[in-house]
Image (cartoon, rainbow, N blue to C red):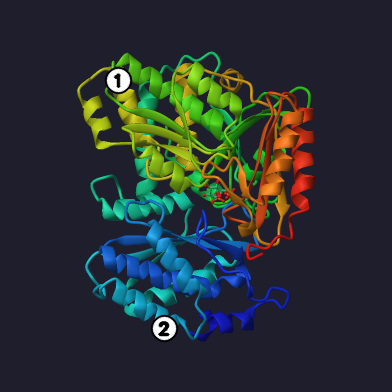
């Protein structure tokens, strides 16, 4: 349809947002993300590509329309593979090629891809594209574009409407693995509520420090309505959630990204008393962080690292008590953003060697999948636990309480992808298990003071890092300045600059012995980086 062509797209664009010329689109960390006006032709082509993936695999494939923590006016799309995972890498390349083709080149690109993939049959049994979207206003039009693309070669298209990103991953997984659990969105609630109850019923109800009261920032996103549905199915009194930021402007002064980066309570939390446990989702409910307000007016943030370590402690202790420490390979996967003290705690207190991989869920997930059981979390609150079949077999050998708890926990946490709602249920059960207040949890370790700054650049591709993202290869002269700045701030200082995979920005991260030093170090590096903001990847 003409409105979903690249040229046609300009017809219904606001004039100030023409189709980008010069900067190629690329299937990044979280698929394509742009101002929503840029996206109809991209959705059309991605709808087509998802249908081709469905035809090639004979399976259900997901198309999630979301820009997660980014502002309301942005949107994005990513494809979910049959196992509920991120799109296979070679298909990311196809996506990038298809989207960058001109309208004239598009039919030829389609034909070439069909031939390369041996002309997968039309309408093969099981092949279906399942689409979901977050609450962004642009989502409906983009769904139509995806539908038009998917049905180009008669692939069945199912619109699941408003869902969280992890719910669509769950729906796709269950469509392809019927034995896993109940199907659809309702199935998602049933699965999580029943599993939660199984463990909840076995945990002590006489608690001293843990309290079921929780304030939840829903980022004005899809998590609000979906968490309410899930909460209604939980056992009475298990959780007492005070919902906040349910219907305002998406991610505006609230949500996990802002709380993590600014270290401030979200808007709408002014009346929350000090020391009470607060949880925060992002716009599509795949990230979770916690915090509480302190007497001094600051907040204590419990980010993805703290969640990872709480879960790691629980798993590690259970595996030890079952005598499975040697037999069951176990790991914790982090990224360069992991707080230095979380990494130290993992090694020194829990005896787990941390593994560092590049930013992006797919990198963490792939690494985690190499172990019988692995916890992966990004500091920003994205994460989950993965398990091998062998993990379940090892647990089957025992009918102890510890084995029971691990079995249930492993069904509760969404092993397919980081899921704020499932992670929240898991954290709450673990806190209940330890009878911990949020302060006791926070006291596991003290975060090394840190600071993050975003810098808008002309072309993020001009910034190239080493694999672990801790050093810039290009511009090399900027890395020299970073090294010098870090050295001046003493032994505990650490900093890096890396291009975002989701926005046209670079991120500066700095850690130091004091907050003042971390702020100064980040500011100094930000100033140096700013001088390179007009760099072009071609120059
Ligand atoms: C996405 C990815 C995350 C990543 C985040 C920020 O999250 O799924 O793995 O950490 O972007 O990435 P970057 O620093 O490269 O911009 P979300 O919540 O935006 O989908």
Residue at which label 1 appears: 326
Describe the element under mark 1 as helix, strand or loop: loop
Does the residue at mark 2 contact the one at mark 1 (Cβ under 8 Å)? no
* Classed neighbour count for the residue bearing mark 1: other residues with Cα under 10 Å, few (<14), some (14–19), many (≥20): few
Q: Is mark 1 within 8 Å of ligand 1?
A: no
Residue 267 seen from this side: no
Q: Quadrant of the C terminus?
A: bottom right
The answer to which of 367 and 224 lies nearer the viewer is: 367
The answer to which of 123 and 456 lies nearer the viewer is: 456
Q: Earlier in the sequence, mark 2 or mark 1?
A: 2
Residue at which label 2 appears: 107
At 30% across and 47% down in the image, what residue appears? 182
Picture layout, residue 511 above or below residue 130: above
**Distance from label 2 to label 1 (Cα)?**
55 Å
* Residue sitting at the far left: 397
Picture layout, residue 59 above or below residue 154: above
Q: Kindly identify which numbered label has been placed on residue 438.
A: none
Residue 431 seen from this side: yes
């Amino acid at each position: 349809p003409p409105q979903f062509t690249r040229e046609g797209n300009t017809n219904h664009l606001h004039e100030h947002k023409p189709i980008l010329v010069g900067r190629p689109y690329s299937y990044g960390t979280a698929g394509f993300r742009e101002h929503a006006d840029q996206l109809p032709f991209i959705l059309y082509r991605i709808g087509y590509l998802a249908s081709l993936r469905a035809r090639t695999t004979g399976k259900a494939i997901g198309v999630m329309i979301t820009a997660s923590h980014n502002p309301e006016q942005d949107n994005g799309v990513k494809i979910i593979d049959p196992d509920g995972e991120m799109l296979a890498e070679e298909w990311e390349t196809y996506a990038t090629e298809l989207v960058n083709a001109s309208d004239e080149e598009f039919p030829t690109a389609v034909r070439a891809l069909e031939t390369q993939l041996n002309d997968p049959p039309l309408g093969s049994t099981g092949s279906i594209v399942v689409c979901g979207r977050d609450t962004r206003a642009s989502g409906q039009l983009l769904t139509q574009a995806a539908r038009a693309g998917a049905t180009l070669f008669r692939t069945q298209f199912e619109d699941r409407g408003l869902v969280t990103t992890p719910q669509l991953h769950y729906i796709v997984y269950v469509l392809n693995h019927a034995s896993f659990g109940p199907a659809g969105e309702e199935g998602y609630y049933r699965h999580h509520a029943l599993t939660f109850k199984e463990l909840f019923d076995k945990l002590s109800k006489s608690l001293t420090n843990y309290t079921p009261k929780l304030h939840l920032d829903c980022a004005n996103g899809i998590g609000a309505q979906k968490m309410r549905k899930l909460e209604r199915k939980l056992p009475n009194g298990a959780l007492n959630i005070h919902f906040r930021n349910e219907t305002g402007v998406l991610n505006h002064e609230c949500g996990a990204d802002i709380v993590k980066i600014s270290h401030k309570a979200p808007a709408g939390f002014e009346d929350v008393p000090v020391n009470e446990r607060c949880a925060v989702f992002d716009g599509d409910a795949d990230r979770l962080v916690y915090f509480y307000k302190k007497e001094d007016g600051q907040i204590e943030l419990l980010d993805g690292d703290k969640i990872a370590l709480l879960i790691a402690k629980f798993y590690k202790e259970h595996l030890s008590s079952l005598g499975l420490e040697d037999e069951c390979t176990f790991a914790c996967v982090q990224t360069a953003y992991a707080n230095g003290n979380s990494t130290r705690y993992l090694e020194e207190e829990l005896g787990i060697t941390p593994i560092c991989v590049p930013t992006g869920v797919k990198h963490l997930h792939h690494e985690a999948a190499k172990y019988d059981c692995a916890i992966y979390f990004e500091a920003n609150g994205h994460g989950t636990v993965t398990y091998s079949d062998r993990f379940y077999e090892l647990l089957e050998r025992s009918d102890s309480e510890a084995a029971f708890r691990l079995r249930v926990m492993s069904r509760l946490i969404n092993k397919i992808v980081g899921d704020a709602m499932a992670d929240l249920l898991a954290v709450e059960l673990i806190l209940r298990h330890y009878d911990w207040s949020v302060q006791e949890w926070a006291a596991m370790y003290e975060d090394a003071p840190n600071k993050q700054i975003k810098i808008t650049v002309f072309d993020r591709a001009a910034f190239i890092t080493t694999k672990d993202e801790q050093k810039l290869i290009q511009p090399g002269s900027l890395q020299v300045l970073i090294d010098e700045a870090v050295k001046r701030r003493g032994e505990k200082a650490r900093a890096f600059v890396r291009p975002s995979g989701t926005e046209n920005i670079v991120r500066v991260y700095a850690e130091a012995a004091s907050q003042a030093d971390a702020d100064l170090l980040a500011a100094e590096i930000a100033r140096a980086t700013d001088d390179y903001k007009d760099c072009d990847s071609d120059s």
